[in-house]
Image (tube, helix red, strand yellow):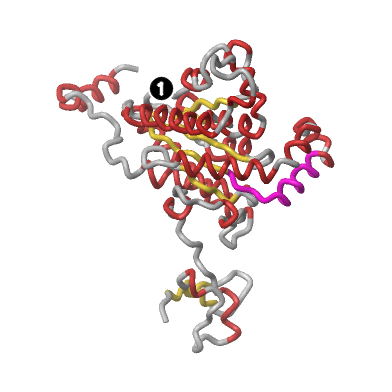
C-alpha cells in the first residue's frame, strides 16, 4: 500500500483527521488498518493532464473518444486549477514576447455550442492584451471570396512574440463547405462550374494545401495547436435549450442551428476525416472532451503550457554586457534623482 498520511486539526473537530492520498487507479480503496471513523477525509489526487492523451493520430475515431472529462472534480475546483495554469501561461507569454522569435497559433473548432467563446475568455484571461489577438471567422465577405480561401487567414496570423487565436479556422473550408458543397460555387474557382466538379480529388487537394500552409508556418517559427472541442449531441441539445430559455442568451440562437443539427452525423464524418488527414507532428490535433466546459478549459490550458514549456530556448533576452556591468551605477543615479 502506497500513500502519504497527513494529520490535520479541523477547527470544528476535536479529533485528529487523517487524509490518505492514493494513486489515481486506487480510487475508493481504503487501507485495512484505517479506522472507519477516519475515512472521512480520504481523497484521490487528480490525474495528471498529459498532452499525449488528447493528441489525435491518423487512425482517430471520434465515436471512440469520450466527450466528458471533469476529473471527478466540481466546477469550482476545476476553475481554481485553471487559475494557476493560466497564470503560468500568462507569464510564459510575457517571456515569449520578450524573446520575439516564435509565434503561437491556437485553432479552435467544434460544433455549435461547443464552448469556444467562453474557453477563449477564461484560458487567456491573464494574458497581456498586447500579446494575444483573437479572430472569429464568419461567412467570407465578397472581397475574401475574390481571393483564395487561405488568404484571409494568412492576414490574421500572429506576429512573432504573440499568440493568435482562431475561433473557427481555415478548416471551415473542408468542413462546412464539404457538408454544403454548393458554397464552393461562391469561391469563383475556374475549374468548378457545378457541384459535380467537387469530387474526392478536390478535397484531397485541399487537405494537401492546408498541410503545406501549416508546414510553412511551422518552419517559419509559428507553433501550432489545433483543438477539436468534442461534445455529445445531447449536450448540444441542452445548451441550445438553455439559449432559448435564458433571455440574456437568446441572441446566440438562430433557427439555422436546428437545420445544422440535423446534419450532425455528416459533420462528425467530415471532422474525423479532416483530423485524420491533417494531424501532423508540426501541427497536431487534440481531441478535447467538452461536455464539461470547465474541464475542457483546463485541458486546453494545460496542453498549451506543457508543450510550450518544452521550448527551453524561449527565455528573456540578456542585457548587453556593458549595461549589465553598470547596473549598480544606474541604481545609484536613480536614487539620487527625485
Viewer-proximal residue among 71 and 157: 157
Query: In this figure, which residue is indicated by the disc labeled 1?
Result: 159
Q: Residue, x 63% and y 38% (percent of image)?
A: 118
Give the left or right position of residue 22, taking residue 338 as reference: right
Viewer-proximal residue among 194 and 10: 194
Q: Residue furthest front?
A: 196
In the picture, residue 186 is in which quadrant? top right
Which percent across, then down, holds residue 281? 37, 42
Which percent across, then down, holds residue 187? 59, 17
Of helix, strand and loop, which one carries label 1? loop
Give the left or right position of residue 338, taking residue 36 as reference: left
Give the left or right position of residue 217, taking residue 129 as reference: left
* Numbered circles on residues, count: 1
The relative height of residue 256 versus residue 27 in the rendered view (above or below) is above
Which percent across, then down, holds residue 128? 47, 29
Residues packed near mark 1 inside 10 Å, few (<14), some (14 to 19) or many (20 plus) = many
Which percent across, then down, holds residue 33? 49, 89
Instruction: Name the quadrant of the N terminus.
Output: bottom left
**Dominant secondary structure of the magenta stretch?**
helix
Q: Residue, x 46% and y 55% (percent of image)?
A: 53
The relative height of residue 69 versus residue 285 in the rendered view (above or below) is below
Q: Residue, x 84% and y 42% (percent of image)?
A: 245
Q: Is residue 296 magenta?
A: no
Q: Is residue 242 magenta?
A: yes
Q: Residue, x 53% and y 79% (percent of image)?
A: 29
Q: Which residues are magenta?
A: 229-243
Instruction: Name the quadrant of the C terminus.
Output: top left
The relative height of residue 72 versus residue 213 in the rendered view (above or below) is below
Amino acid at each position: 500500500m502506497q500513500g502519504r498520511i497527513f494529520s490535520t486539526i479541523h477547527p470544528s473537530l476535536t479529533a485528529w483527521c487523517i487524509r490518505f492520498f492514493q494513486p489515481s487507479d486506487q480510487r475508493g480503496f481504503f487501507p485495512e488498518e484505517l479506522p472507519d471513523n477516519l475515512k472521512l477525509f480520504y481523497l484521490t489526487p487528480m490525474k495528471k493532464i498529459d498532452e499525449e492523451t488528447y493528441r489525435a493520430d491518423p487512425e482517430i475515431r471520434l465515436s471512440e473518444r469520450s466527450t466528458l472529462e471533469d476529473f471527478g472534480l466540481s466546477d469550482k475546483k476545476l476553475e481554481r486549477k485553471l487559475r494557476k495554469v493560466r497564470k503560468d501561461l500568462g507569464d510564459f507569454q510575457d517571456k515569449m514576447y520578450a524573446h520575439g522569435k516564435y509565434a503561437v497559433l491556437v485553432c479552435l473548432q467544434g460544433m455549435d455550442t461547443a464552448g469556444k467563446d467562453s474557453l477563449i475568455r477564461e484560458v487567456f484571461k491573464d494574458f497581456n492584451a498586447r500579446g494575444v489577438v483573437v479572430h472569429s471567422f464568419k461567412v467570407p465577405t465578397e472581397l475574401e471570396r475574390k481571393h483564395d480561401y487561405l488568404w484571409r487567414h494568412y492576414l490574421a496570423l500572429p506576429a512573432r512574440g504573440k499568440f493568435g487565436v482562431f475561433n473557427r479556422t481555415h478548416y471551415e473550408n473542408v468542413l462546412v463547405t464539404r457538408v454544403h458543397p454548393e458554397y464552393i460555387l461562391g469561391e469563383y474557382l475556374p475549374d468548378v462550374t457545378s457541384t459535380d466538379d467537387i469530387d474526392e480529388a478536390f478535397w484531397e487537394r485541399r487537405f494537401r494545401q492546408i498541410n503545406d500552409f501549416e508546414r510553412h508556418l511551422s518552419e517559419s517559427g509559428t507553433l501550432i495547436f489545433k483543438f477539436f472541442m468534442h461534445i455529445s449531441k445531447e449536450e448540444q441539445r441542452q445548451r441550445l435549450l438553455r439559449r432559448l430559455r435564458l433571455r440574456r442568451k437568446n441572441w446566440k440562437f438562430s433557427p439555422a442551428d436546428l437545420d445544422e443539427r440535423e446534419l450532425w452525423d455528416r459533420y462528425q464524418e467530415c471532422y474525423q476525416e479532416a483530423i485524420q488527414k491533417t494531424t501532423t507532428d508540426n501541427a497536431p490535433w487534440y481531441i478535447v472532451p467538452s461536455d464539461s466546459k470547465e474541464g475542457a478549459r483546463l485541458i486546453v490550458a494545460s496542453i498549451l503550457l506543457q508543450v510550450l514549456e518544452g521550448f527551453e530556448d524561449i527565455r528573456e533576452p540578456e542585457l548587453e554586457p556593458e549595461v549589465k556591468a553598470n547596473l549598480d551605477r544606474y541604481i545609484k543615479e536613480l536614487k539620487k534623482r527625485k
